[in-house]
Amino acid sequence: MSVEKPENLVELFENSVAEHGPREYIGTKNAAGVYEWITYAQAGKRVDDLRAGLAAEGLEKGDTVGIIANNRVEWAIAAFATYGLGCRFVPMYEAELPSTWQYIIKDSGIAALFVSKQEILDKVEAFRDKVPGLKKIFLIEGEGPGSMAALEALGRENPVPSVKPDSPDQIAVLIYTSGTTGEPKGVL
């Protein structure tokens, strides 16, 4: 089977950044209901910095990175940074039960986890001893040690190139089902 370029999510994103750099990419409504946009170039820089920050924290190709957050800019940044490191990405929503997060974190082997806010972090910390594979947790909303912002700053100081998938069989994302007939199931 022949696949045309770009043939993977890493190249697709990087090509889009190169081609559309100054154009608006993702918009978020502010408190007044007005969209505030980031450009492809701004998103690309954040992805590069976050990817390098994850690498500086010891993550490498084949590891699993998770996120517990509702839809937001940082969700996309974390996903593309993860893909570019050759890692798998596992999304979870804030509305899920902590027991579901615990199951998914353990089942998928998440080594690093992004959480949206302190309330979510507190819930994860309550079961952290039951998921020994979870090495790092990063807070999206916040500054200072352990935050996504600090991880991006670390990456700015220690850049690394992206890793392209070496096989079409390499897993980009594991999405877990709702588990209506038992425990959630991971879908590649």
Image (spheres, rainbow, N blue to C red):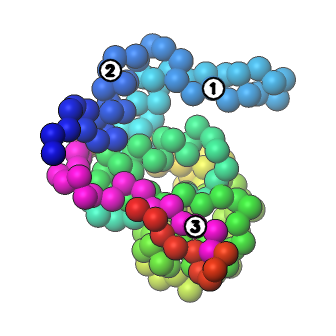
* Residue 178: assigned label: none
From the image, tell me which residue sits under label 3. Answer: 177
Q: Quadrant of the C terminus?
A: bottom left
Dot in front, 2 or 3: 3
From the image, tell me which residue sits under label 1. Answer: 27
User: Taking 62 as reference, is 18 above or below it?
Assistant: above
Across and down, in percent, residue 11 comes to 28, 35
Instruction: Report the front residue among 185 and 50.
Output: 185
Please report whichever mark, 2 or 3, sits nearer to the chain's N-terminal start: 2
Residue 180 quadrant: bottom right
Dot in front, 3 or 1: 3
Across and down, in percent, residue 76 comes to 51, 41
Magenta stretch secondary structure, dominant: loop
Q: How many C-alpha atoms fall within 10 Å of the one at disc 2: few (<14), some, or many (≥20)? A: few
User: Taking 67 as reference, is 20 above or below it?
Assistant: above
Across and down, in percent, residue 186 comes to 48, 69
> What are the residue bounds of the magenta stretch?
163-179
Task: Give the residue drawn at x 60%, y 49%.
Answer: 140
Question: Disc 1 residue type?
Answer: Gly
Question: Disc 3 residue type?
Answer: Thr
Mark 2 element type: helix
Q: How many C-alpha atoms fall within 10 Å of the one at disc 3: few (<14), some, or many (≥20)? A: few
- How far apart, in angstroms, are the residues tagged by discs 1 and 2? 19 Å
Please report whichever mark, 1 or 2, sits nearer to the chain's N-terminal start: 2
